Amino acid sequence: MENFKNQEILNWAAFLQLKEQNSKDSRLRDFYHAGTYHNETPLSEIDFVALDFETTGLDSQQNGIISIGLVPFNLQRIFCRKAKKWYITPQDNLQENSIIIHGITHSDLQDAPDLLRILEQLLDELAGKVVVVHYRHIERDFLDHTLRILINEGIMFPVIDTMQIEADLHRKRSKGWLNFFSKKRPESIRLANSRTRYNLPVYPPHDALTDAIATAELLQAQIIYHFSPDTAIKNLWL
């Protein structure tokens, strides 16, 4: 099966049309059929959905999803009443060190469904919107790998990665002789640290829905500070 993870997609709308034609799963075909925006669409016209996973570890090949949170938003509003959160039975065992981080225990997952039971609802929430994450190699890679296990078919879609935006901004700032000789320590681009630079409120970390809302707020702030509502979506999505 083709692997697009490390390739740059120049035309996401055409790519999703191709995926629809080649997909064998009806849920994925419906997801791809919803399509996406033209490259030149301004950010002001985009419907976004912030997505966050809590997982049993950081390796999408070895670990599993245990919680999903999402919230739709645009540049003006975050639609908290339409937010969704699920606990998910992971594909691997819940480890003690991951429990310490996210606080999700075996009892929380006792009656949790596997991903297939909520897949149609999840894809309906994402379809036609631009997905926003903080570090795309969690949400996009974990979802892709989990579906390969469950239905023998992965998934690919455009995302805006707020962590990548912060990384690119810091890389630009660090250029130049003055910064080279000052040996200034790189700033953290983790979600909480990134939010602090925009004077956004502090939220408890490692809850999928809270982190999704935090990511939505962060993108809104990044656009206000560094871009424009008229910026074309092609400049931000990956």
Image (cartoon, grey):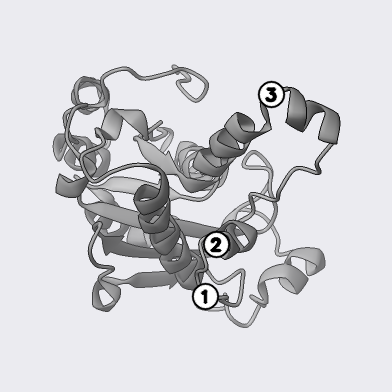
Residue on which disc 2 sits: 195
- Amino acid under label 2? Arg
- Distance from disc 3 to disc 1, alpha carbons, whole Å, reads 32 Å
Rendering coords of residue 49 (x, y %): 31, 55
Rendering coords of residue 90 (x, y %): 58, 59
Residue at 37% x, 63% y is 70
Marks 3 and 2, the one that precedes in the sequence: 3
Q: Quadrant of the N terminus?
A: top left
Marks 2 and 1, the one that precedes in the sequence: 2
Q: Nearer the viewer, residue 154 or 15?
A: 15
Rendering coords of residue 175 (x, y %): 66, 26
- Distance from disc 3 to disc 2, alpha carbons, whole Å, reads 26 Å
Q: Secondary structure at mark 2?
A: helix
- In the displayed structure, does residue 199 sit left or right of residue 189? left
Residue on which disc 3 sits: 176
- Amino acid under label 1? Pro
Q: Secondary structure at mark 1?
A: loop
